Amino acid sequence: MNAEKSTRSTCASCGNSFAHYRCMPRRFCSRQCFHLRPSKRIKKCPTCRRTFVAPCVNRKRFCSKPCYWIAQQRPHARFNRGITWRQRSEQARMRDSHCCVSCGAAYQVGDRAFPVDHIVPYRISKTFSDDPNSLENLMTLCRSCHSTKTGFERYFLAGDMFAYVQLLIWKLHLSEDRMNAAFQWCGLMEVHEKRLWLPGDYQSVDRVWSWRSSR
C-alpha cells in the first residue's frame, strides 16, 4: 500500500489500528469485525439534547419526529422549507387525493407518504414570494416521478426554463393549468396553446415545442 495515499484509523469493533486508502474511508479492519460490531449505540439528539438508543446501521439523528420538525424550522437547516411547509405539504396531498399527479400511482396504506414537490424549485420561488409553499406551486409525486423531476431542475437552475417546462409537460404529463398556476403565481411565464409567453412583451416562444417535434 502506497504510504502517500494511505492513512490509519481505529477499528470501531476491536479497537486495533489499521491502514487504508484515504479515498476509501473504513470503520472496520476486517469483515469479521464488521459482523461483530455492536447492533446499537447511544446517540444525542441535537434538538432536545437527550440521549437515545439507535441501531448502528441507522443514520437517525433525532429522538423523535417533533424534534426533527423543530430542527427543520431553523433558518440554517439543510432541508428547511419554512414554518408552513408541514401544513401545506399535507394539504397538497389531500388536494391530490394522495395520488401521483404524473403517473397516477395511488398511496397504499402502511407505506410512507408520497413526497410533495415544488413546481418552481424552492430556492427560486422563495425569491419571488414571501410564501414559496403556496398550494399553486406544490404537487404530489411518487418517489420515482419525484426523482425524475429533481433531475429536470438542473435545466431550470441553469437558466433554460424552456427545456424545463417541456420536460415537465411531455415527460411528467403535467397539465397546462397546473403549470400556469405555478408560473403565473411567481410571474415567470405562461403556458398556453403549446407556447411559452414571457412577461413584459408577452411574445410567444416556440423553440421548446419545435425541439421535441424534430426528434
Image: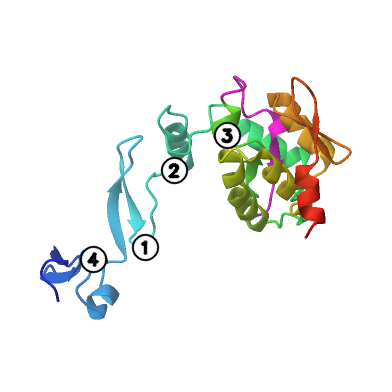
> Residue at (56%, 24%) from the top-left corner?
127
> Residue at (78%, 54%) from the top-left corner?
212
Between residue 64 and residue 113, name the one nearer to us: 113
Specify the amino acid type for callout 3: Tyr
In this view, the residue farthest toward the bottom is 32
Between residue 191 and residue 32, name the one nearer to us: 191
| Mark before the other along the chain sequence, 4 or 1 | 4
Instruction: Between label 3 and label 4, give the one nearer the viewer.
Output: 3
Q: Which mark is residue 27?
A: 4
- Label 1, residues with CA under 10 Å away: few <14, some 14-19, many ≥20: few
| Mark before the other along the chain sequence, 4 or 2 | 4
- Label 3, residues with CA under 10 Å away: few <14, some 14-19, many ≥20: some
- Secondary structure beneath label 2: loop
Specify the amino acid type for callout 2: Ser
Residue 205 visible in the snapshot: yes
| Mark before the other along the chain sequence, 1 or 2 | 1
Magenta stretch, residue numbers: 127-142
Instruction: Between label 3 and label 1, give the one nearer the viewer.
Output: 3
Q: Which mark is residue 122?
A: 3
Instruction: Between label 4 and label 1, give the one nearer the viewer.
Output: 4
| Mark before the other along the chain sequence, 3 or 1 | 1
Q: Which mark is residue 57?
A: 1
Specify the amino acid type for callout 1: Val
The answer for how far apart the CA atoms under marks 4 and 2 are is 27 Å
**Residue denoted by label 2:** 64
Residue 98 visible in the snapshot: no
